[in-house]
Amino acid sequence: MDDQSIYMLLLYYVITHLSSPNFPLCEASALNAVVIDKFCGMCYNVYTMINCVDAAFAYEGNTVISGLNFSVNPGDYLCIVGENGAGKSTLLRGLLGLKKPSHGVLTRSSENGIGYLPQVYSVRNDFPASVLEVTLSGRLAGMKRRFYNKEDVRTAHANLRLLDADGYINSSFAELSGGQQRRVLLARALTAATDLLILDEATASLDPLVTKDFYKSVEKLNRERGIAVVSVTHDLPNSVLYAKHILALGEGRQLFYGTTEDWIFAVNNEQLTADWEREEAGNV
């Protein structure tokens, strides 16, 4: 029986029995067990945007990262941290649907509602596109039309205004500063996104003040629009400031996944343990 048939059966089952004083969902029948199990699964999938269960990724049979167990829910803000070579880029490809797990499961409930901001976006000095045109290009991925419509233009304008980038909307993108370009590219990603933003080292090469401003813009989107954010970063201090959850990778595996508060506690505990072990070794 497929999901749609079970869903229709569930609706009929609930409608016909909910008003009864002897509502039989609590009975231990095989039918009820199947319906409840599928119903819970459907509800979980609806409210979980990304679900990773015991996943691993490999290249040519060689496992790069394994033991991945985490989820991303609507309104979440997850930072993925780790040293170079920890598997962050490989996992990112999986999150974008560009690479399948070699083991386990990685599911995404949203396909077209994802905005992506890459780490490097090099532009030639003679690149002719304006800020508005670059922002509008975020619509191209899911667009089946040949031309932008009025709603596309309104959305681009609104996103630039939200990120305080509408002051240079008609300027050449190539002539903007690095910080201004990142702000426009964030607006572009937001124009593509309805549910989820994926950021890859989004503040790389930016000065501290621009970095702080950028993080505040992302946090505003997360807080006010409820857009989930997944950020791959080396920037641990800002990750702790803004993220709701931390996923730490290292040594080819998942080292930690949990709330930011639990991450801070774990890191502090680890530091205290390391200090104690050094002290004990010095007393021997």
Image (cartoon, rainbow, N blue to C red):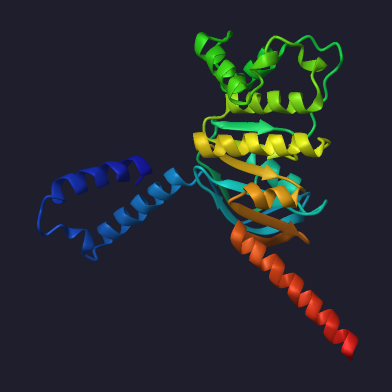
Q: Position of residue 158 (x, y in %)?
A: 55, 19
Which residue extends farthest bottom?
284
The answer to whether residue 276 is left or right of residue 154 is right
Residue 68 position by quadrant: bottom right
- In front: 276, or 123? 276
Q: Position of residue 280 (x, y in %)?
A: 83, 86
Q: Is residue 97 positioned above or below 279 on the image?
A: above
How many discs appear?
Answer: 0
- In front: 284, or 5? 284
Q: Is residue 260 positioned above or below 130 on the image?
A: below
Q: Is residue 20 positioned above or below 154 on the image?
A: below
Residue 128 position by quadrant: top right
Which residue is rendered at x = 51% and y = 35% of the image? 224
Which residue is rendered at x = 84% and y = 36% of the image? 205
Which residue is rendered at x = 27% and y = 41% of the image? 8
Q: Position of residue 4 (x, y in %)?
A: 34, 40
Which residue extends farthest front?
209
The answer to whether residue 13 is left or right of residue 77 is left
Which residue is rendered at x = 11% and y = 59% of the image? 22
Q: Is residue 99 visible?
A: no
